[in-house]
Image (tube, grey):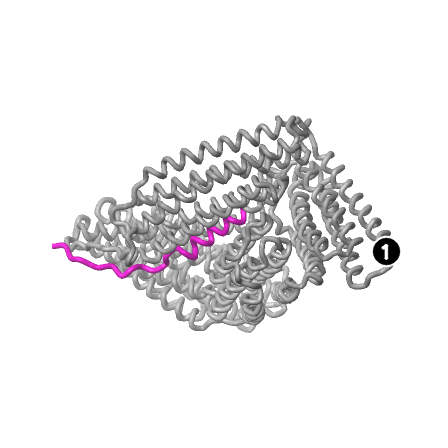
């Protein structure tokens, strides 16, 4: 190939790149005109072919300047490929002729345009690679500049005001965030290799330019996808600033390639990399601002899940008879007005939240935050009000707490629906789902108001509880059908058989209550039936996955739904009887007929469970002996933990409270010691209660069948004792880590709350069989109250320690090397914390999804579902508590200069 001397290699290369850019800009006009705009087709074709003469001529000129034959052939082949793909596109649009009805040819036009773009991209990559190898980055700078210009110019593809791919804001955000993160990583790599691996800078510049081009191409799309002009403008400006920073770093990289080893060029490149990283953070912040409402909804949903877990914990204490007001003189009337007022405010927040889906992200964020604040206030007021009813009215307490739990669950669903519907058209299915969720929310709030007004009326609260349970079962069935219920992979056919027994018991009690018409019996049936149906549906959903074929799977799911509907119908009959008393014989006939229907449904479920069995069942060992050994082992384990805790010493620099002799560490350690002492007393009391049950004959002393009451009770007691011992050890380890400065107060708070939850488990387990008036049970109750009080004191002290945390002191060195080291370490810490935050949020989301169905326990503890449910919900509460109590602000550090 004869060498041409009418231009330099650099000049030819830049001319080729310019021609390719112009040709690429004219592909879309030809594509669109060829499909539907015949009047513009001729002009579009003329604009496209104007640059091919220059492309071919300069490609030959550039190839003539390259001595390597292989590289010459590559350049000429790429140029030929662009020309051939252009010819194919012209033939295709000519055949279609701009006819919008010739849909069969439209796909060919699309394919031809894509092929041509790919051919141009391949040629551009070859040109940029050649430029990088030679140390010339002008073509890359030109590409970056053109990408910057493209942001301001509204391209042909956006002429109709919509994004080319009809993507949502979140779709664009996901794609663009990936580009921004890659640009930041490439910039850091360029800085690191500027001194040791200079030859790799050219390739890095090329990758930087490609990622920025992809980012710039999506700017107009994301601007069209958001209805907030301010957000769109902020994203555009931040991306442009990033583009300017990218141009600077590429130019500095060119200086390093031209002058390897030049420390000044290396320093300039490092500063440019730092500037690129800073601009990347601005772009990410702009994206976050654009989805502020969506992010607020996600955080609000997590907070509400924590509130639901807290309510479940309180219900456990109420069931065990341990929920009492701190002030014995408090009455429900003190909190009644506050509950009613807050509930009405929540309805207004609900309206604002629904409206927020169609408004700006800022309005949506404010609405979500207000809703969380209101539901928190409402839950606190209801819990305090329930406590004033006294443990002797535990069924009324549970009824009231279940009502506010229904409201919290409905709010959680509403927030999720609002997040999904945000920015959607009014006719979108997501908006219809949002309206339905809002109706359920208002209905549940109304139900709560009715419950609050009747909870003190012994003549009405049974009827109200019954009505609330009927609605609650309806909600459980909806969740069951929608597939949102959690599936436990460890469930067995035995669990399915076991889950039917509470339904049978609840049915028998419901028939008796319907016959007697006593309000106290009615409220017991309502609370018992709700729990039994929830557990049954959850186990049916999980057990269905064990089926070998679709038919058996559907039979199990349908059987669970039918049994739940039959029980719901039984409650409706009782409710109708309470509203309109009829002939006694007619009442009995209706109740007995429905009870037989439920019995048939239960029998069907049991037979289906038998079909799932594929192994023989083996009787366990004597459950009473196992329970006693576990209690003794737990007592020994807690004593060892107490000894270890006694040897701990507070940190020397721990914070002191004003006007107090003890610092926070001393207060926390004393509270932890009180907890270990209280749990040791609790285990001894539980052991005495278990021995008393065996001695009185309430528990079989010679073993029991695996499915017997005694076996299930023993398994629940064993599980509870293990949890108390394990939680106490976790508390000691957390206290030890705290005084060593290796853990935070938040971890200690979580451990203390776990001790409280395990205590509630043990109280409930013992109460199932024990006589509430026995001395052993009274001692156990006293010990449980002591544990609860001690854990409350520890949590309070730890939270005060967090609030009074001392200001950090930071020493900044003036020496350049040490200053750079400090900066690298600080940036490393930021990246670690950001990654940990993302992982923690993902973990919390997974836990919340599991919680939504009240995760069943493992096989060993499944017989005591009400106990195991507590662990799942309380753990989620701890996770959410961390989100609320972890400080999100920086203290004002005192800066000192080191000479």
Q: Nearer the viewer, residue 732 or 229?
A: 732
Residue 590: where, in percent of width, then height? Answer: 84, 53
Give, as a single range, the part of the protein colored magenta. 872-899
The residue pinned by badge 1 equals: 584
Q: Please rate how many residues cluster around mark 1, counting C-alpha atoms within 10 Å: few if below 14, some from 14 to 19, many from 20.
A: few
Within the image, what quadrant is residue 435 found in? bottom right
Judged left or right of residue 135, residue 817 is left
Measured along the vertical axis of the image, is residue 547 above or below residue 431?
Answer: above
- Residue farthest left in this picture: 899
For the point 50% across and 37% down, the residue is: 683
Residue 523: where, in percent of width, then height? Answer: 69, 55
For the point 59% across and 59% down, the residue is: 389
Q: State which quarter of the image contains the C terminus.
A: bottom left
Q: Nearer the viewer, residue 720 or 269?
A: 720
Residue 586: where, in percent of width, then height? Answer: 87, 55
Tag 1's secondary structure?
helix
Judged left or right of residue 751, residue 248 is left
For the point 84% across and 52% down, the residue is: 588
């Amino acid at each position: 190939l004869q060498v041409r001397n009418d231009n330099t290699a650099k000049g030819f290369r830049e001319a080729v790149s310019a021609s390719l850019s112009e040709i690429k800009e004219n592909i879309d006009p030809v594509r669109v005109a060829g499909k539907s705009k015949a009047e513009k087709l001729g002009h579009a074709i003329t604009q496209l072919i104007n640059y091919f003469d220059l492309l071919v001529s300069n490609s030959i000129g550039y190839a003539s300047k390259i001595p390597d034959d292989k590289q010459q052939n590559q350049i000429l082949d790429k140029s030929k490929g662009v020309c051939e793909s252009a010819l194919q596109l012209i033939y295709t649009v000519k055949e279609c002729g701009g006819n919008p009805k010739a849909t069969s040819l439209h796909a060919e036009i699309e394919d031809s345009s894509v092929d041509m773009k790919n051919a141009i991209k391949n040629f551009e990559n070859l040109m940029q690679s050649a430029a990088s190898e030679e140390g010339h980055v002008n073509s890359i700078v030109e590409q970056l500049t053109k990408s910057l210009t493209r942001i301001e110019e509204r391209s042909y593809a956006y002429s109709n005001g919509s994004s080319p791919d009809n993507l949502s804001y979140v779709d664009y955000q996901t794609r663009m965030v990936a580009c921004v993160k890659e640009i930041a990583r490439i910039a850091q790599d360029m800085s690191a290799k500027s001194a040791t691996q200079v030859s790799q800078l050219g390739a890095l510049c090329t990758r930087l330019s490609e990622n920025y081009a992809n980012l710039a191409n999506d700017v107009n799309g994301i601007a069209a996808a958001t209805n907030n002009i301010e957000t769109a403008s902020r994203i555009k400006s931040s991306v442009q600033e990033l583009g300017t920073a990218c141009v600077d770093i590429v130019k500095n990289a060119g200086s390093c390639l031209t002058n390897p080893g030049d420390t000044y060029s290396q320093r300039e490149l490092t500063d440019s990399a730092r500037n690129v990283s800073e601009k990347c953070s601005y772009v990410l912040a702009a994206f976050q601002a654009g989805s502020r409402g969506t992010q607020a909804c996600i955080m609000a949903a997590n907070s509400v899940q924590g509130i639901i877990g807290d309510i479940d914990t309180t219900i456990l204490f109420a069931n065990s008879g341990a929920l009492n007001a701190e002030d014995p003189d408090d009455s429900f009337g003190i909190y009644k007005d506050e509950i009613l007022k807050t509930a009405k405010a929540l309805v207004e927040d609900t309206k604002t939240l629904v409206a927020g889906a169609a408004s700006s992200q800022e309005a949506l964020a404010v609405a979500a935050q207000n809703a969380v604040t209101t539901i928190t206030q409402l839950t606190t007021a209801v819990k305090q009000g329930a406590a004033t009813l006294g443990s002797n009215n535990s069924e009324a307490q549970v009824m009231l707490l279940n009502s506010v739990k229904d409201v919290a669950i409905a709010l959680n669903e509403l927030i999720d629906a609002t997040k999904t519907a945000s920015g959607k058209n009014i006719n979108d299915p997501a908006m219809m789902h949002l309206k339905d969720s809002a109706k359920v929310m208002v209905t549940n709030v109304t139900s709560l108001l009715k419950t609050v007004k009747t909870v003190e009326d012994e003549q009405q609260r049974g009827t109200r509880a019954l009505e609330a349970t009927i609605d609650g079962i309806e909600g459980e069935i909806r969740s069951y059908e929608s597939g949102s219920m959690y599936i436990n992979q460890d469930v067995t056919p035995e669990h399915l058989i076991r889950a039917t027994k509470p339904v049978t018991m609840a049915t028998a009690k419901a028939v008796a209550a319907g016959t007697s018409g006593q309000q106290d019996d009615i409220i017991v049936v309502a609370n018992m039936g709700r729990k039994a149906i929830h557990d049954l549906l959850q186990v049916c959903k999980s057990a269905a996955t064990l089926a070998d074929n679709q038919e058996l799977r559907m039979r199990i799911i349908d059987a669970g739904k039918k049994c739940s509907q039959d029980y719901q119908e039984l409650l409706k009959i009782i409710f109708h009887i309470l509203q309109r008393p009829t002939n006694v014989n007619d009442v009995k006939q209706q109740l007995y007929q429905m009870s037989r229907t439920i019995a048939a449904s239960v029998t069907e479920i049991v037979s289906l469970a038998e079909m799932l069995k594929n192994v023989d069942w083996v009787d366990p060992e004597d459950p009473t002996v196992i329970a006693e050994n576990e209690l003794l082992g737990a007592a020994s384990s807690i004593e060892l933990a107490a000894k270890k805790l006694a040897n701990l010493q507070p940190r020397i620099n721990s914070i002191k409270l004003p006007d107090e002799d003890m610092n926070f560490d001393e207060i926390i350690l004393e509270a932890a010691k009180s907890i270990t002492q209280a749990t040791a007393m609790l285990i001894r009391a539980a052991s005495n209660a278990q021995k008393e049950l065996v001695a009185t004959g309430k528990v079989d002393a010679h073993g029991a069948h695996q499915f017997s009451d005694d076996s299930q009770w023993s398994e629940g007691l064993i599980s509870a004792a293990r949890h108390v011992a394990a939680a106490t050890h976790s508390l000691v380890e957390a206290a030890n880590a705290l005084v060593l400065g290796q853990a935070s107060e938040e971890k200690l708070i979580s451990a203390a709350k776990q001790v409280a939850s395990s205590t509630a488990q043990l109280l409930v387990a013992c109460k199932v069989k024990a006589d509430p008036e026995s001395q052993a049970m009274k001692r156990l109750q006293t010990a449980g109250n002591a544990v609860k009080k001690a854990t409350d004191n520890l949590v309070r002290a730890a939270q005060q320690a967090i609030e009074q945390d001392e200001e950090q002191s930071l020493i900044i060195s003036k020496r350049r090397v040490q200053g750079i080291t400090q900066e690298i370490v600080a940036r490393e810490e930021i990246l670690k914390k950001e990654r940990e935050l993302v992982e923690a949020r993902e973990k919390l989301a997974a836990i919340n999804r599991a919680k939504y169905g009240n995760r069943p326990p493992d096989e060993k503890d499944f017989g005591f579902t009400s106990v195991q449910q507590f662990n799942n919900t309380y753990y989620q509460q701890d996770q959410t508590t961390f989100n609320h109590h972890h400080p999100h602000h920086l203290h004002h550090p005192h800066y000192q200069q080191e000479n």
